[in-house]
Amino acid sequence: MIRKLLLLLAVGLLLAVLALAVAAWRLHVALEQPLQLSAERLIEVVPGDTPSGVLNRLQTDGVLDGALWLRLYWRFNLPGQPLHSGEYRLTPQLTARDVLGLWQRGEVVQYSLTLVEGWNFRQVRIALARQEALQQNLPALDDKALMAALGEPDASPEGRFFPDTYRYVRGMTDLELLKAAKLRLDQILDQEWQQRAADLPYSKPYDALIMASMVERETGVPEERGQIAGVFVRRLRIGMRLQTDPTVIFGLGDSYKGNLTRSHLLMPSPYNTYLINGMPPTPIALAGREAIHAALHPVDGKSLYFVARGDGSHVFSDSLDAHNRAVREFQLKRRSDYRSSPKPDKEKP
């Protein structure tokens, strides 16, 4: 009797070992199988999806086999591991094990959007609307509602977002991206404000942001930013009007067709710095850190005027007579390839 029991136990143990060996082999085959793809493919994992559900979907689509074994592997080897939502890039070179590794590490596909120095908010809206992977909320919101959604219902969106490259994943909203850009600007503006030069004609950081936006639109030459800011600051100190074309162009909006005329300079507008005293009520463009720094560290000097040479740089003058001579030389006798700043690539959303 004892011999029979031992024999049965031995047979049972052998069968168990064989079953484990078969299971291990089946699991190995499932994990090491190459994906059945002929080209790259994106799969989207939405909030609420489970590894089991996505694996079953991939098996139904013919991308892999052995979904059961892969589900068991995830359950017992990665207990409590969340499945990050987003898009995952599958390629023919990957194995099923590689896919599980992507999920474990949350290596979702990332997209990017660059907000460019000098853009106005209309251009920002256009750029966001072109991002197909972003969930679009902005088209249903006017500027006031948009800023209310960002926690500042009485603020203008102009210039309130930091120009930089932002990465995002499919399903993120345009509002979330703008919130990140606004937070980034607030942080940089605060840092620069804390280190500002003394005796500036600004009562708050927002004033410096308005100045920075004008500096950004006036020059594409980095070395001139501090000089441009210096001219504007000196004018503010003596009560002289800023008389800067970019503010007039901003105030004209869609009616500006690329040629600023004398009649434009006579049109009343809160942004026409040929007619108003002081600065415009809001920024006129996105300002980068260098422009913000220049607004808070204007270069000392005596110049009160500047005129574009036509190559993106400017001639600075201390007196009106010297300025008028520069105007005659560079404005009245314009070169064929004349351009003011910023550079043309800053104009495109």
Image (tube, rainbow, N blue to C red):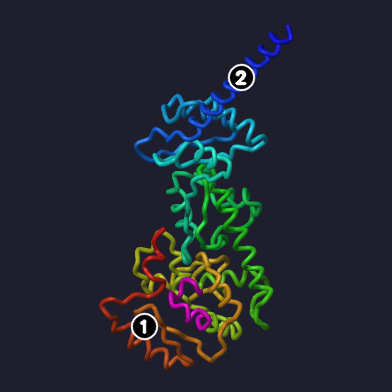
- Determine whether 300 is above or below 289 in the image: below
Residue 222 is a magenta residue: yes
Bounds of the magenta segment: 215-228
Q: What's the residue at 61%, 19% (across, down)?
A: 14
Q: Residues within 10 Å of mark 1 (few under 14, many from 20)?
A: many
**Which residue carries the number 1 mark?**
309
Q: Give the vertical position of 66 relative to 330 (above or below).
A: above
Label 1: which secondary element: loop
| Residue drawn 63% across the image and 73% down it | 192
346 or 96, nearer to the observer:
96
Q: Quadrant of the C terminus?
A: bottom left
Q: Main secondary structure of the magenta part?
A: helix
Spot occupied by residue 325 in the image (x, y as percentages of width and height): 37, 91
Q: Nearer the viewer, residue 265 or 315?
A: 315
If the image is split into quadrants, where does the N terminus sit? Answer: top right
Residue 347 sits above or below residue 137 on the image: below
State which mark lies toward you, 1 or 2. Answer: 2
**Which quadrant of the view contains residue 324?**
bottom left
Tag shown at residue 14? 2
Q: Is residue 48 above or below residue 142?
A: above
